[in-house]
Image (cartoon, rainbow, N blue to C red):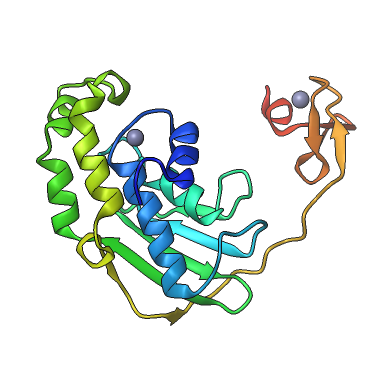
Amino acid sequence: MNTNDELYKVGLALHGHKCPAMPLGLRAGLAVMDALGVAHAPDGQLTALVEIDKNHCSTCFADGVQVATGCTFGKGNIRSLGYGKFAVTLIDNKTGRSVRVVATPEAMRRSQESEFIQYRKKGVPASQVDPKIGAPLIDQVLAEQVDVLFKVEPIKQAQVPPMPPHAFDTIICADCGEVTVERYARVKDGKRVCIPCADKA
Ligand SMILES: [Zn+2]
Ligand SMILES: [Zn+2]
């Protein structure tokens, strides 16, 4: 895979800047789908559990996972476990089969020791780092052998929590006038309102 690959271009369009962690997430998503024997999910067939949290290095990993697997924030089938780790578990919701893929210390070391990260540590936003500095690292992540980048764990059976059916009914909040999914409406002074309006003193 290289930067001319359509998947990388889609990832970059979503993500917004050139960095090594989004491509690492792309590769992780492809590796975990391959290990599980599944394809990109057009609907909610798969669930991805990523282990990143917020405000730490390489959280961009999760955007690559979303693009590769089709498990997205909008579909509600990606969740962060908040461990501060660079792994993804993919679950086939129909069968409960799952696989976890975790970035190797070697893959993370290359990124952490790169010139690109030295700029990031100084507080330079990724989009402001000269693209020439990050390019070799991105090329390497995209082209590297799977077993250098990741440890791929054996297939396991996961517990898939039952999903409530999709809600399509909406109401107009009697207070702010905004559209609210009916399941989230509350009754306040005999009127149906949204949660923020219900919580207002
Ligand atoms: Zn990034
Ligand atoms: Zn309201």
Q: Is residue 118 above or below residue 2?
A: above
In the displayed structure, does residue 69 sit left or right of residue 198?
left
For the residue pair 78 and 82, the one nearer the viewer reads as 78
Q: Is residue 39 above or below residue 143?
A: below
Residue 150: x and y in percent read 26, 63
Residue 180: x and y in percent read 79, 34
Residue 127: x and y in percent read 32, 22
For the residue pair 164 and 197, the one nearer the viewer reads as 164
Quadrant of the image occupied by residue 74: top right
Quadrant of the image occupied by residue 138: top left
Q: Residue at x 32, y 75 (%)?
A: 153
Residue 198: x and y in percent read 73, 30
Count how many numbered circles sit on residues in the image: 0
Q: Residue furthest front?
A: 4
Q: Residue at x 28, y 22 (%)?
A: 125
Residue 41 visible in rendering: yes
For the residue pair 137 and 170, the one nearer the viewer reads as 137
Q: Residue at x 79, y 19 (%)?
A: 176
Q: Is residue 49 above or below residue 121?
A: below
Q: Write down which quadrant ligand 1 falls in.
A: top left
Residue 53 visible in rendering: no
In the displayed structure, does residue 96 sit left or right of residue 186?
left
Q: Residue at x 12, y 38 (%)?
A: 114
Q: Is residue 59 above or below residue 32?
A: above
Quadrant of the image occupied by residue 155: bottom left
Which quarter of the image is occupied by the C terminus?
top right
Q: Residue furthest right?
A: 190
